[in-house]
């Protein structure tokens, strides 16, 4: 028999615990009331028909089978894709979920993923049916390309295609969207601009020379080289805007800036398709919004590279943490740094951008500790950078068997633009006064894509 005193004591403890924890009245978490608003804001840009994600999260019916996968993806912070270390920098396009949103999705799944009352649902988002997220004033027609279902080795190497812009006068563009018809097979598409030359062949794919084959053996090349072979960017002002999964348009107007495209220049489009087993015909279009008057400030896309001499870029076999030579630029002007985008290939592991101010102070402005080649994300920011500041970028590569994307840990990997080679290219964007010569903004230790 339990002594009375004991029971009383237990009752007292129970009462104290209840008082301390005091649960709020239980309102069930439902799809319509709690989860759908999160999906609309953070997931549907990719998770709807015709976009890059494998399933739609527009409705309860389409989302419900994925409930468990959604919980695990958000709890592990795999989704939405966002790789910046939250300790450093501040990004205006930060799409990572707030802890309370993660908690809401987890509690919804744990309570059986109920639909709830239709009256609680927010109205559906009006996604543009034609795929244009900007309202273009001008549309330039890109190439039409047949993407095979199953090419050799399952790879279509990337190509350049030159097209006329048709711009009759110098044009200040305020936003750019590169719009593939089939985002599901578009790995990336980037633009470069160059003066028109009479010998240009429009709409004819030009494939990159290879300086090494897939086994890493050198193939002799001649002519001006970049990473060992002809640089197709010669004569352009560098690689500019890109379409990338998760990065669909570039809007300079948010920075009160615009980008100049001189009259009559041609546009080169770099296209890389990743076949997915279903043959499609893609047609790329590039839309621009245009400023009526020249802006106060211009947007300039820049890039640097760790490579001064490609010979020194060689990742040893089975090295899980190879540090490449750093990339470094000096700013010769006051700039506003507004965009950062690490670029490496499948062995890329991490990348860190550090500013070294003229007074010696150092500031990490972006750290991507877990780089993922499938997500070439850009990070929007706003940092006033005084003249004389250096940008120093460090990166590591994982050429070991632990890297699940590594096709072959047993070979030395050299610098190059082919998928089986490696790159270490920090891209960035700055805004400067309109009258500043874009070529004089930075001095780079290694070669840059804009010839500076
Ligand atoms: C920038 C585009 C993008 C956004 C935003 C995004 N996703 Fe995804 N998601 C993808 C793509 C592409 C895949 C397939 C490839 C992969 O798994 O990385 C995917 C895969 C997934 C998967 C895994 C499916 C499986 O095979 O297990 C889940 C679950 C998921 N997403 C949930 C979400 C949720 C929930 C959100 C919002 C909180 C979200 N995603 C936001 C693009 C996106």
Image: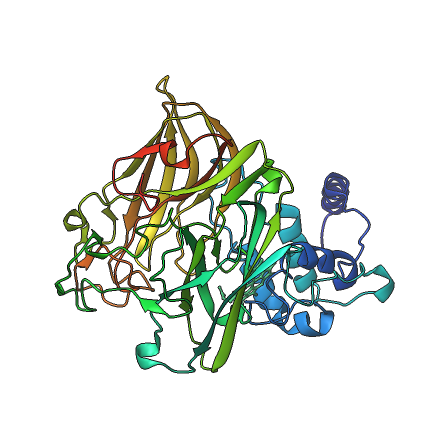
Q: Is residue 170 left or right of residue 405?
A: right
Q: Position of residue 130 (x, y in %)?
A: 66, 67
Q: Is residue 64 left or right of residue 251?
A: right
Q: Is residue 32 left or right of residue 377?
A: right
Residue 399's image quarter?
bottom left
Tell me which residue sits at (75%, 67%) in the image.
114
Instruction: For residue 401, say whether it is visible.
Output: yes
Which quarter holds ligand 1?
A: bottom right
Q: Which quarter of the image is occupied by the N terminus?
A: bottom right
Residue 75's image quarter?
bottom right
Tell me which residue sits at (38%, 21%) in the image.
361
Q: Does 403 appear above or below 94?
A: below
Residue lying furthest top: 359
Q: How many marks?
A: 0
Name the colour scheme. Answer: rainbow
Tell me which residue sits at (57%, 43%) in the image.
252
Q: Position of residue 311 (x, y in %)?
A: 14, 50
Between residue 302 and residue 63, name the one nearer to us: 302
Q: Which quarter of the image is occupied by the C terminus?
A: top left
Q: Position of residue 294 (x, y in %)?
A: 59, 37
């Amino acid at each position: 028999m339990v002594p009375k005193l004991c029971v009383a004591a237990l009752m007292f403890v129970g009462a104290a615990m209840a008082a301390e924890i005091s649960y709020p009245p239980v309102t069930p978490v439902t799809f319509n009331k709690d989860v759908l608003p999160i999906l609309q804001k953070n997931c549907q840009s990719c998770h709807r028909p015709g976009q890059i994600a494998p399933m739609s999260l527009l409705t309860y019916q389409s989302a419900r089978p994925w409930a468990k996968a959604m919980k695990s993806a958000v709890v592990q912070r795999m989704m939405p894709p966002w790789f910046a270390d939250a300790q450093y920098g501040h990004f205006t396009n930060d799409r990572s979920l707030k802890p309370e949103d993660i908690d809401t999705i987890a509690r919804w799944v744990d309570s059986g993923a109920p639909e709830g009352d239709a009256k609680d649902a927010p109205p559906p988002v009006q996604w543009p049916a034609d795929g244009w997220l900007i309202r273009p004033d001008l549309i330039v027609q890109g190439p039409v390309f047949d993407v095979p279902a199953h090419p050799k080795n399952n790879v279509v190497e990337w190509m350049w295609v030159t097209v006329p812009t048709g711009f009759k006068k110098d044009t200040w563009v305020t936003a750019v969207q590169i719009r593939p018809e089939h985002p599901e097979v578009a790995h990336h598409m980037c633009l470069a601009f160059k003066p028109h030359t009479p010998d240009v062949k429009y709409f004819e794919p030009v494939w990159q020379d290879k300086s090494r084959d897939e086994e890493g053996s050198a193939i002799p090349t001649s002519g001006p080289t970049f990473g060992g072979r002809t640089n197709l960017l010669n004569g352009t002002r560098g690689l500019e805007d890109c379409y990338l999964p998760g990065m669909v348009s570039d809007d300079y107007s948010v920075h009160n800036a615009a980008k100049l495209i001189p009259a009559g220049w041609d546009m080169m489009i770099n296209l890389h398709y990743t076949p997915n087993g279903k043959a499609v015909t893609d047609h790329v279009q590039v839309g621009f919004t245009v400023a009526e008057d020249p802006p106060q400030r211009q947007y300039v896309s820049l890039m640097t590279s760790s490579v001064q001499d490609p010979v020194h870029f060689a990742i040893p076999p089975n090295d899980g943490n190879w540090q490449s030579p750093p990339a470094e630029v000096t700013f010769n002007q006051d700039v506003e740094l507004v965009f950062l985008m690490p670029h490496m290939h499948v062995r890329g592991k991490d990348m860190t951008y550090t500013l070294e101010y003229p007074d010696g102070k150092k500031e990490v402005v972006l750290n991507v500790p877990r780089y993922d080649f499938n997500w070439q994300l850009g990070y929007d920011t706003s940092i006033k950078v005084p003249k004389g500041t250096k940008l120093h970028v460090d990166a590591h590569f994982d050429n070991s068997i632990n890297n699940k994307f590594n096709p072959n840990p047993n070979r030395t990997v050299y610098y190059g633009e082919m998928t089986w080679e490696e790159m270490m290219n920090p891209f960035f964007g700055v805004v400067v006064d309109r009258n500043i010569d874009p070529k004089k903004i930075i001095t780079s230790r290694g070669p840059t894509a804009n010839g500076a």
